[in-house]
C-alpha cells in the first residue's frame, strides 16, 4: 500500500476548485474572493478563499433579526418546528459527501472521520425530530386540596452558538437541531478557521426553512475572529451562549455572560485518560488507545492524552503501542491509506514541539514520534508523527491540554492511585477503563471513581454517540449538549399552580386571616 507520507499532496488550486464546487452544490454563495477572513486548507496550508468578516453592526442586526423570528417561532407548535429539522436532516444527508469534503478540506479530517461527522449531524436531526413531541413537563402532587401543580417548558430566546475548528459542523448541529425544536432562534459564530463548512451548513438550513415555510431568520450566520464572537456574546438579547472551544475562551466568555445574567453552556478543553488494568483485553485496549490518541491527529476535545497502565503490564503495552504507531499512515487526508491528517496550523506544531521539550525536561522519554513529516512541496502544512512519551509522574505539562497527538504514559500500582491520576487534572471531559474485572469497572463508574462527564468501560475516550448528553466537569465547563435531557438547557421552565377549588388555602398551612 502506498505510504501517504511520501505520496505527493494535491495542489491548492485543485483543492480550491473542490471547495467551490461543494459550496455551490450546497447553495452557498460566497461572494467576492476578498476580505480579511482567510479560509485555508491545512492539507497544503494554501488559501481556499478570502471572505469578509461580519462587522459589529452586522452581528447586532443578525441578533435583532433572529430575535424577531423567535417571536413567531416560539408559538409555532413544537412538532411543526420538528418539520424544519426533519427537512434539514434530509438535506444534510443529500449533501453528505459535499459536507464531508469541506470538513476534510478545512479541518484536515480523514475521509471516514469527516463522513462520520456528517452522519452525526443527520443522527442529531433525527433525535431532535422525535424530541419535538417529547418536551415533557412534570405534574407534582400539590399539598393543597383542589390544586394542581405542574411545570411547563417554554422556548428560551436567541441562542448564540460559538464553535471550534475541530468539529466545524457537528457541534453546530447538536446545538441548532435541539434549539430549533425547543422554539429558539440561533445565531452561529463558527471558528475563523472553518468558515466555508459553516456557510454550506447555513445555506442548507435556509433551504430547509424555505421548503417548510419557517422564518428564514430563525438561523443566522456571522463570520469572523473572536471579536465577532465578543459582540455576539455581549448582546443582552442572546439568552443562551453555547460556546465550544478552549478553556481560555470559556474563561473570557463565562464571566461576561454571567455579568448580564445570561445563560452559558460551556464545552471546553479536555485532558482525557484511560486506565489499563492487568485483566484488560490487550487487543481491545491497543485498538481503543490508538484510535482515541492518534485519530483526528490528536485534535479532538475527547482525544486520549494519558494512558495510566498497571506497572506489571506497562512494558508489554508500550511495545504493542509502538508497533501500532509505526503503521499509522500520515499525510493527505483524502488518501485512502491515511489515518493521521495534518495539524490545523503552524502554531499547533509549535505547541507540540514545546510540550515535548517540557516533557523531556521533566524526565519524560519520547518512545516514538513527535517529529515533523517533511513536505517540501507544502512548507506551510504541518504533518507530525504522533508521539508516545513515558513520564515519571503527572507533571505540569501532562496536566495541560496540548491540542496535538501526544500520548503520555503513566504507571500505577493500586487502582486507587490510577483513579487519583485520572482525576488529577483540571479538566473533566472523558475517561475510560480497560478491564475484565467487574469490580474495577463498577468502581470506575461509582461516585468516587472517574470525575468526568463521560466515563467508559472497554472503550477509548473519543467517539461519543449523540443519544447521550455530551460534556464535562471542572474546567471543561459543565455544559451538556446533544442527547438525553440536554434539551432542557435550551428552554425555560415555568412552575404552574392552578387552584380549581372555591377556597384559597396557603402553602405550608399559613393562615392570613
Ligand atoms: P478557541 O477557543 O481558539 O476558539 C473557539 C471559538 O471561540 C472560535 O469560534 C473563536 O473565534 C471563539 N472565541 C475565542 N475567544 C472568544 C471570546 N473571547 N469571545 C467570543 N468568542 C471567542 O478553540 P479552537 O482552537 O477552535 O478549538 C480547540 C479547543 O476547543 C480545544 O481546547 C478543545 O478541547 C476544545 N473543544 C471542546 C469541545 C467540547 O465539546 N468540550 C469540542 C470541540 C473542541
Image: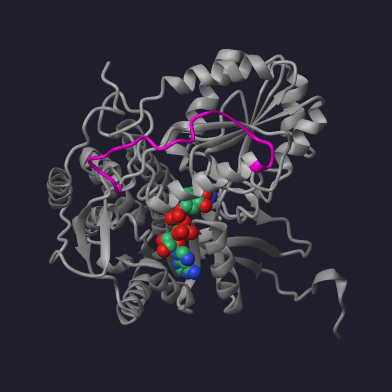
Q: What secondary structure do most residues of the magenta stretch adopt?
A: loop
Task: Answer with the quarter of the image where residue 6 lies.
Answer: top left
Residue 364 percent location from the top left of the image: 65, 35
Residue 166 percent location from the top left of the image: 41, 48
Task: Give the colouring mode of the picture.
Answer: one colour
Residue 478 appears left or right of 326: right
Residue 271 percent location from the top left of the image: 61, 44
Residue at x 64% of width, y 60% of height:
150
- Residue 135 visible? The answer is no
185, 105: nearer the viewer = 105
499, 64: nearer the viewer = 64
Residue 141 appears left or right of 205: right
Q: Which quarter shows the N terminus? A: top left
Q: Is residue 210 above or below residue 315?
A: below
- Indicate whether residue 372 is drawn in magenta: yes
Residue at x 52% of width, y 62% of height:
491
Residue 217 percent location from the top left of the image: 29, 68
- Considering every residue shown, the one lying at the far bottom of the view is 513
239, 232: nearer the viewer = 232
Please tell me how many numbered marks the rendered image carries.
Answer: 0
481, 216: nearer the viewer = 481
In the image, the segment drawn in magenta is 361-380
Residue at x 13% of width, y 52% of height:
24
Q: Which quarter shows the C terminus? A: bottom right
Residue 66 appears left or right of 465: left
Residue 78 appears left or right of 154: left
Residue at x 17% of width, y 57% of height:
28
Q: Is residue 329 above or below residue 470?
A: above
Task: Answer with the quarter of the image where residue 194 lies.
Answer: bottom left
- Residue 27 visible? The answer is yes
- Indicate whether residue 462 is drawn in magenta: no
Amino acid at each position: 500500500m502506498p505510504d501517504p507520507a511520501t505520496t505527493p499532496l494535491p495542489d491548492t488550486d485543485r483543492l480550491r476548485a473542490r471547495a467551490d464546487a461543494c459550496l455551490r452544490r450546497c447553495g452557498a454563495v460566497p461572494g467576492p474572493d476578498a476580505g480579511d477572513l482567510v479560509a485555508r486548507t491545512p492539507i497544503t496550508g494554501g488559501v481556499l478563499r478570502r471572505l469578509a468578516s461580519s462587522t459589529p453592526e452586522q452581528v447586532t442586526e443578525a441578533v435583532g433579526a433572529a430575535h424577531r423570528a423567535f417571536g413567531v417561532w416560539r408559538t409555532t407548535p413544537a412538532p411543526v418546528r420538528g418539520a424544519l429539522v426533519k427537512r434539514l436532516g434530509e438535506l444534510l444527508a443529500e449533501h453528505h459527501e459535499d459536507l464531508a469534503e469541506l470538513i476534510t478540506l478545512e479541518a484536515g479530517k480523514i475521509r471516514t472521520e469527516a463522513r462520520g461527522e456528517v452522519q452525526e449531524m443527520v443522527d442529531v436531526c433525527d433525535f431532535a425530530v422525535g424530541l419535538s413531541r417529547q418536551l415533557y413537563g412534570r405534574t407534582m402532587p400539590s399539598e393543597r386540596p383542589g390544586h394542581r401543580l405542574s411545570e411547563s417548558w417554554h422556548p428560551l430566546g436567541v441562542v448564540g452558538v460559538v464553535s471550534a475548528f475541530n468539529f466545524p459542523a457537528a457541534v453546530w448541529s447538536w446545538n441548532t437541531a435541539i434549539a430549533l425544536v425547543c422554539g429558539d432562534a440561533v445565531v452561529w459564530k463558527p471558528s475563523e478557521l472553518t468558515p466555508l463548512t459553516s456557510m454550506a451548513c447555513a445555506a442548507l438550513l435556509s433551504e430547509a426553512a424555505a421548503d417548510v415555510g419557517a422564518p428564514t431568520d430563525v438561523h443566522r450566520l456571522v463570520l469572523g475572529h473572536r471579536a465577532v464572537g465578543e459582540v455576539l456574546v455581549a448582546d443582552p438579547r442572546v439568552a443562551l451562549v453555547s460556546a465550544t472551544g478552549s478553556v481560555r475562551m470559556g474563561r473570557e466568555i463565562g464571566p461576561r455572560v454571567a455579568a448580564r445574567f445570561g445563560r452559558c453552556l460551556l464545552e471546553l478543553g479536555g485532558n482525557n485518560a484511560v486506565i489499563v488494568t492487568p485483566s484488560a483485553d490487550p487487543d481491545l485496549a491497543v485498538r481503543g488507545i490508538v484510535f482515541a490518541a492518534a485519530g483526528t491527529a490528536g485534535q479532538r476535545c475527547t482525544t486520549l492524552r494519558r494512558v495510566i497502565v498497571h506497572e506489571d503490564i506497562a512494558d508489554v503495552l508500550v511495545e504493542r503501542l509502538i508497533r501500532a504507531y509505526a503503521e499509522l499512515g500520515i499525510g493527505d487526508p483524502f488518501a485512502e491509506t491515511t489515518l493521521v491528517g495534518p495539524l490545523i496550523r503552524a502554531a499547533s506544531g509549535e505547541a507540540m514541539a514545546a510540550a515535548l521539550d517540557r516533557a523531556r525536561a521533566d524526565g519524560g522519554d519520547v518512545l516514538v514520534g513527535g517529529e515533523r513529516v517533511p513536505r517540501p512541496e507544502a512548507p506551510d502544512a504541518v504533518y507530525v508523527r504522533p508521539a508516545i512519551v513515558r513520564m515519571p509522574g503527572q507533571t505540569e505539562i501532562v496536566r495541560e491540554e496540548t491540542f496535538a497527538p501526544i500520548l503520555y504514559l503513566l504507571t500505577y500500582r493500586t487502582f486507587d492511585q490510577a483513579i487519583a491520576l485520572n482525576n488529577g487534572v483540571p479538566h473533566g471531559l472523558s475517561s475510560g477503563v480497560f478491564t475484565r474485572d467487574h469490580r474495577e469497572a463498577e468502581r470506575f463508574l461509582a461516585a468516587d471513581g472517574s470525575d468526568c462527564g463521560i466515563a467508559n468501560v472497554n472503550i477509548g475516550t473519543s467517539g461519543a454517540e449523540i443519544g447521550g448528553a455530551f460534556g464535562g466537569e471542572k474546567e471543561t465547563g459543565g455544559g451538556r449538549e446533544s442527547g438525553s435531557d440536554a434539551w432542557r438547557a435550551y428552554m425555560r421552565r415555568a412552575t404552574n399552580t392552578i387552584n380549581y377549588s372555591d377556597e384559597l388555602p396557603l402553602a405550608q398551612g399559613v393562615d392570613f386571616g
